[in-house]
Image (cartoon, rainbow, N blue to C red):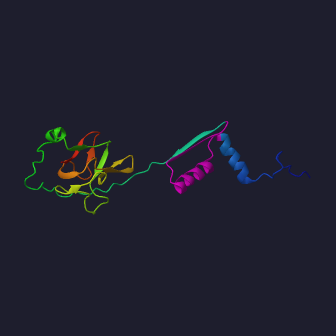
Amino acid sequence: MATPRPPASGKPTSEKGSKKSEMSKSGVDQELIRQLAALLTETDLSEIEIETDNLKLRVARQITQTVAHVPAPAPMAAPAGHAAPATAAEAAAHPGTVTSPMVGTVYLAPEPGAPVFIQPGSSVTEGQTILIIEAMKTMNHIPAPRSGKLTAVLVDDGQPVEFAEALFVIE
C-alpha cells in the first residue's frame, strides 16, 4: 500500500492549503483581502496597495466625515465715533485692513462655544492671535500684524476665505 508523498517543500498538504492555492490560481486571495481590510480599520488608513511579481492589489475604504456646523455669533456694532468701512470694497482700500494669508475656513474663537479672540472696539497688540484659519485640516493661528484698535470684523465664524481677502480693520 502506498503512502501519500509530502510536497517538495516537505510540509504536509492540508485542505486549507489546497483551497488557498486554488484561490491563487484564480488570481484572487480572499483571505489576503480580508486581512488587508482589517489592517485598514486597525491603522485608520484609507488605502493599502501591495505588489509582488505576479500580483498587484489595492484595498481602499471610503471615509465619511461629519462636520458640525457652529452658528456664527451675532455681529457686534462698532462703538460710536469710529467710522467702520460700510462695504468690503471700502474695507479692502482701508490702510488698516488685515487680509487673509491663506485660503481656508475662518474661526473667530479658539473652539466652538468659547468667546471670540477679539471684538470690535477692543485693543489689539502686535502678535496677538486674532483668529484661526483652518487649511487642510491644520489650525493656523493668525497673529495681528500691528497694534491698534479693532474697528471692524469683516468675516463670519465658519466662513470660507480666499487669499488676501479682507478680514479685519485695525486702526
Image check: 2 left or right of 47? right
Nearest to the observer: residue 65 or residue 55: 65
What residue is at 17 percent from the left and 58 percent from the top? 74
To which quarter of the image does residue 85 belong? top left
The answer to whether 114 is drawn above or below residue 4 in the figure is: below
What residue is at 27 percent from the left and 39 percent from the top? 164
What residue is at 72 percent from the left and 49 percent from the top? 18
Stretch of the chain drawn in magenta: 26-53
Residue 59 locus on image (x, y percent) = 54, 45
Looking at the image, which residue sits at the far right?
A: 1
Nearest to the observer: residue 131 or residue 5: 131
Residue 147 locus on image (x, y percent) = 24, 51
To which quarter of the image does residue 124 belong? bottom left
Residue 14 locus on image (x, y percent) = 76, 53
| Residue 43, magenta (yes or no) | yes
How many numbered dots are placed on residues in this image?
0
Nearest to the observer: residue 153 or residue 72: 153
What residue is at 10 percent from the left and 51 percent from the top? 82
Residue 170 locus on image (x, y percent) = 20, 48
Image check: 111 left or right of 82? right
Nearest to the observer: residue 43 or residue 165: 165
Looking at the image, which residue sits at the far left?
A: 81
Image check: 118 left or right of 134? left
| Residue 170, magenta (yes or no) | no
